[in-house]
Amino acid sequence: MSPTDPTRTDPAQNDPLLRVSGLNKSFGDNEVLRSIDLNVQAGQVLALVGPSGSGKTTVLRCLNGLERPDAGTVDFSAGPAVTFSEKTTRRQKESLRTRSAMVFQGYNLFPHKTVLQNVTEGPIQVQKRPKAEAIAEAERLLERVGLAEKRDDYPHQLSGGQQQRVGIVRALAQQPSLLLFDEPTSALDPELVGDVLTVIKELAEEGWTMVLVTHELAFAREVADTVVFMDGGVVVEQGPAQEVLRAPKQERTRAFVHRLLNPF
Amino acid sequence: MEMPDIDWQLAIDSFWPLLRGGLTGTIPLTLASFTLGLALALVLALMRIGGSRVLSGIARAYISAIRGTPLLVQLFVIFYGLPSMGLTIDPWPSAIIAFSMNVGGYAAEVIRAAILSVPKGQWEAGYTIGMSRNQALRRLILPQAARVSVPPLSNTFISLVKDTSLASTILVTEMFREAQQIAAFSQEFMLIYVEAAVIYWVFCLVLSTVQDRLERRLDRYVAH
Ligand SMILES: Nc1ncnc2c1ncn2[C@@H]1O[C@H](COP(=O)(O)OP(=O)(O)OP(=O)(O)O)[C@@H](O)[C@H]1O
Ligand SMILES: [Mg+2]
């Protein structure tokens, strides 16, 4: 679909923050993504679900400029679209990074920096925002995820759930237009999952636009507007969360949803 | 073997010249060579891990040559060899050049391994907050790599303190050359060389303590 496609009719589809079309990515002979099309509407949550190895992480990494797709277009409404080919420069790929911020499965906090420094590193060092302003903003964000008193701790002094909340705050502090979450709770002990999901849900309610890779289907059903089901590097089915997760049309989606909701 | 009488007066009289040789020769030579050597090592390490095959090959050949040849030979090539090609360098600069080049070759591999030991996720976390490769290297990767390199680099440093005694062979007045001169003059070889050995030992003990402290301080942000 091109940005001027006149055939679009659904009014909800009229304000896409991000359009991805024809995304392809291979690692050697392994075709990991095949012609992926996605639209993310401003203020909406898109949940990306699918079995292990289906390419979910790779999609997020392509959106964040961490991986270079072989072909396809990534078009953030606020900036120039990047169409990938052999000739795409590193600079073009990296231009995507300022649009989105990633929350990693394994947190990837900076171990040699305090919680506050983890959060302010990007705003101060990269975005060159005034130090006092960046610190005040970081403190406000830490406060809202309940970690104000941890500002001077080092990451290893925090629980996994606390570390992941810092990871989320670090992403928010970049003031991205899109948040990318890669299985943000899958490395956590079960009793710590709730705190992190609560934060994500609040962000969704606040109107943050996000792409969320998750195996927590109940949570996806609660927060996501759109669900995209991937398998084997292709999008098998996508649509409103309620439809895809409650009444999937495709057999593969049905089997996947059934298996995750009834594990035993 | 007979037990010699120890000439305590000579031991005391020679202590200051020896210590002076250490303070004005051994230590400055070590510090200058180590600093320059580390800078060279960092450049070599970055050449090794950077994208360019040519640069990586040059660095690898250099490191191999340095590690595959005796330090004494490197020292002689620079001080006694270069003049025959029309390039004469004084003893002190010759020694600093030779030791820096040597430290560079050894420390490069340490630094390279330390950089590679930092998880890939740290680079990516840097990229996702908008950092360039250089920024991520400088602000995230090198500080973490430094922590890992402190123990092996401390060992390189301590070895260098002892290796600087080789500079006596190219006429640099450091502690060991001082010892040779006093010994030749007094003919008390055992006493003077053991005394010099003790002073080297004390230097190294002090450095080991500093190393321990440094490691403990750098440990503070790492989980155990
Ligand atoms: N850097 C890489 N080099 C080679 N192959 C890769 C690389 N990254 C991913 N792959 C392959 O790409 C495929 C998709 O991986 P991806 O991590 O995107 O899946 P996923 O849907 O996120 O899976 P999971 O649910 O297990 O996280 C897998 O077959 C994986 O082995
Ligand atoms: Mg994944």
Image (cartoon, coloured by chain):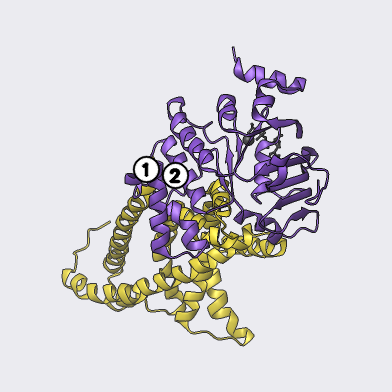
Which residue is rendered at x = 57% and y = 62% of the image? B134
Task: Specify whether residue A113 is in view.
Answer: no
Tell me which amino acid carries mark 2: Val
Residue B143 in percent (x, y) is at 46, 57
Colour chain A appears in: purple
Quarter of the image that includes the C terminus of chain B: top left
Residue A64 in percent (x, y) is at 64, 49
Q: Give whichever of B83, B142 is nearer the camera.
A: B142
Q: Chain of mark 2?
A: A
Label 2 lies in ligand 2 vicinity (Cβ under 8 Å): no
Q: Give whichever of A256, B113 is nearer the camera.
A: A256
Tell me which amino acid carries mark 1: Leu
The residue where tag 1 is placed is A147
Provide the letter of the chain coloured yellow. Answer: B
Q: Residues within 10 Å of mark 1 (few under 14, many from 20)?
A: some
Q: Chain of mark 1?
A: A
Asked if B97 appears above or below B191 in the picture, the reply is: below
The residue where tag 2 is placed is A166
